[in-house]
Amino acid sequence: MKTYLAPKFLVRRDSERCIQCQVCVNQCTFDTHYYNTEDGEVRSREENCVGCHRCVLFCPTRALTISRNPLDYRENYNWRPEVIEDILKQAETGGVLLTGMGDDKSQRIYWDHLVLNASQVTNPSIDPLREPMELITYLGRKPDQVALNQVQGEPGSFNLKTELAPQVKLEVPVMFAAMSYGAVSLNVHESLARAATEMGTLWNTGEGGLHPKLYRYGNNTIVQVASGRFGVHPEYLDVAKIIEIKIGQGAKPGIGGHLPGEKVSAEISLTRMIPQGTDALSPAPQHDIYSIEDLAQLIYALKEATNYTKPISVKIAAVHNSAAIASGMVRAGADIIVLDGLRGATGAAPKIIRDNVGIPVEMALASVDSRLRQEGIRNQASIVVSGGIRNSGDVAKAIALGADAVYIGTAALVALGCTVCQQCHTGKCAWGICTTDLRLTKRVNPEIGARRLANLLRGWSIEIKDILGGLGVNAVESLRGNRLHLRGIGLTDTELEILGVKMVGS
Amino acid sequence: MTEEKAPNVIATRISSPLASPPQSPTLRIDAAGVYYRELNARLRELVSNGTKRIELHNVYGQRYIGTDLDRPVDIEIFGVPGNDLGAFMDGPRIIVHGNAQDGCGNTMNSGEIIIHGHAGDITGLSARGGRIFVRDDVGYRAGIHMKEYQDKKPVLVIGGTAQDFLGEYMAGGVLIILGLNPSGLSPQEPALNKVNGRSLGEGECPLKQVQGKFIGTGMHGGVIYLRGSVKDFQLGKEVGIAELDEKDRLVLKQLVGEFAQHFSYDAEEILYHKFAKLFPLYLRPYGRLYAY
């Protein structure tokens, strides 16, 4: 069938600069560039280009320019080129549109409508370069009250009488989001694990198990238990710092996942503990969780399985009734609840789900935090948010809205080279990130990857300290849930009310 | 769907002497009124101290028994253990003299669970290894997403019948459902006591067919052996049905043999009856769902 899909990108090759070295041919994984043996020229098939810019970055003579094909159909706000292309694609294949990364539509990004405060005159701002700034965060259930014991023979000295639930210390309130081995490569996992270890934070295995090589990073590892239960076995649960039950994911709330058999290589088979080449199918629900009571049962099964030594986290996609659900999760025994918003990314999801299901995490966070406070149970669980955290400003705003910490997924991958071309589901990632093809995965060097990720977190830490100093506080704890530090801009009264922030100027 | 003769040979229960005497001293625990956390903490302590045989008496619904035990130990339970019996279990052998509730063998890695009674919903969910033998019926969603890996191959043998969604998303292992109905002799409904026009002799049990639907929906690995027959509408779209071959018979002989030994049945008589083999039609049932 002849395709009616026009190329999305145009490839321009400056013939004066091009030295026919074929680097572009080797770098492109989508067969866009090729060497024509007849006339000895490197040429391009534009229809294959996904706009990942790998070739542009690696061309030694900067001979290549990739630009969007303007596709100047007659102007129509309703029937935009993307809409037309999607219909054509389905007319030609009869399948579900699959895509990668997070929602790219124009639903409001509330981070951009929130601004932070700073101290002026009436209270001094603090210079973080001169004075200590505390970013340490403890994840886990906090007691309703603490009791102290007077230390014998030492007047004025006390120690803690209350037995604390397991707490996990983060040096910086930014963790790496769940990305499974299989969706991303082992080198990416190693980069994340090393960077998390170096920076005193945590990374998350996702639902694809933990490679034996990475067990030594266990102290900085969150392991996931999801509906497929891939690679879940006693050592996996034992090695982790936190166990996370994955109920949902912001990119695809309510649906399961299919890791295609061709991605289940020998190594993937090892960590997922399934035979090589079979599809790794994650059912939509966990079939032992059909209710809050069932969730409690799995939470306590995991606590029993690890002798109550580590916090159990439960991750849900941000949806309409998140606040009520979160209340149930906390009452079910979750020590940490994770809210993954509409813009949360994925290695593969039906596009229609990714772009249309779920709510922005800012709103979910604000309503969950408010609800748990109203019910007097906010201390019983830490809140972690993810799905569209792009910079330290977003982190600070999330914390002010009530989050204890955030997860970054896409931002971490961008640090490794990802250009958000949304081809994760093809398994052909030219940047070697979202692929299991061994020729490609070596494009991410774990040592360099770890350095890039650690650098990112270091930069964000300094920025968060700057923000705190400006606010006149010296600990992230003083910003947490302090919505007075926020003001909304360009928001309706209802939006402001849900966010629990005032309008700028008031 | 297979064509087959109406059942005319039915398994009989034979009485056998009690199992062989214990080799090592047995520790008896009275679980009456003990909260599950205490009970399991106690078990952990005992097992880490090297106790090899434990008897739990008066068990009334305590959850997670056997969950965090990673050494070989024999646990005999008298009473009704609660949900998630042996969840994430790695090694122990649990014998239940009574019924088990939901989630028995959930995500089990290795070990053995033998239930002299019924088991509830999601029996053997996501099990990767180990063996579960249930003398009587199981509830809904038994054996969902069982999977196998290298030398690990979970086995779930159900003596009675099962409700809907049996073996859904099954990715590996062996699921056997025998349809034994030892209590089927009913003075109230004499019709139930006849098979193929012939009245059953004393001790013979009629076969009860699995009535559950959506059997093996999304199945992409493993095998289900079903004694008796099954109707097309009961099966998921991804399931094929076949006659047994020699290899299947060997597997059945071994596992039904073990089952019969545990529950004092005559394996020969169980195996005499016709079995249907349910297998995944596709290794990648949803491979063609997407437009790339």
Image (cartoon, coloured by chain):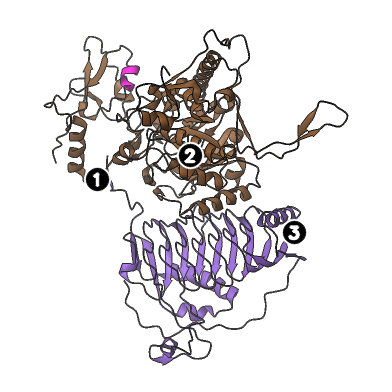
Chain colours: A brown, B purple
Q: Which residue is mark 2?
A: A206
Q: Quadrant of residue A376?
A: top right
| Whole-number angstrom distance, CA of label 2 to CA of label 1 | 27 Å
Closer to the chain start, of discs 2 and 1, is: 1
| Whole-number angstrom distance, CA of label 3 to CA of label 2 | 37 Å
| Label 2 residue SS | helix
Q: Which residue is mark 1?
A: A95
Q: Is residue A501 magenta?
A: no
Disc on res. A240:
none
Q: Is residue A449 above or below residue A222?
A: above
Viewer-nearest of discs 3 and 2: 2
| Label 3 residue SS | loop
Amino acid at dot 1: Gly
Q: Dot 1 falls on which chain? A: A
Can marks 3 and 1 be said to lie on one chain? no
- Where does the magenta region start and end? A52-57
Q: Which x, y percent locates residue A493? A: 37, 28
Can residue B150 be seen here? The reply is: no
Number of labelled discs? 3
For disc 2, the neighbor class at 10 Å (few under 14, some 14 to 19, many from 20) is many
Can residue A436 be seen here? The reply is: yes
Q: Which residue is mark 3?
A: B51
| Whole-number angstrom distance, CA of label 3 to CA of label 1 | 57 Å
Residue at the image position 67 percent from the left and 81 percent from the top? B17
Q: Is residue A56 magenta?
A: yes
Q: Is residue A458 above or below residue B182?
A: above
Q: Which x, y percent locates residue B189? A: 43, 88
Q: Which x, y percent locates residue B129? A: 54, 57
Q: What secondary structure do most residues of the magenta stretch adopt?
A: helix
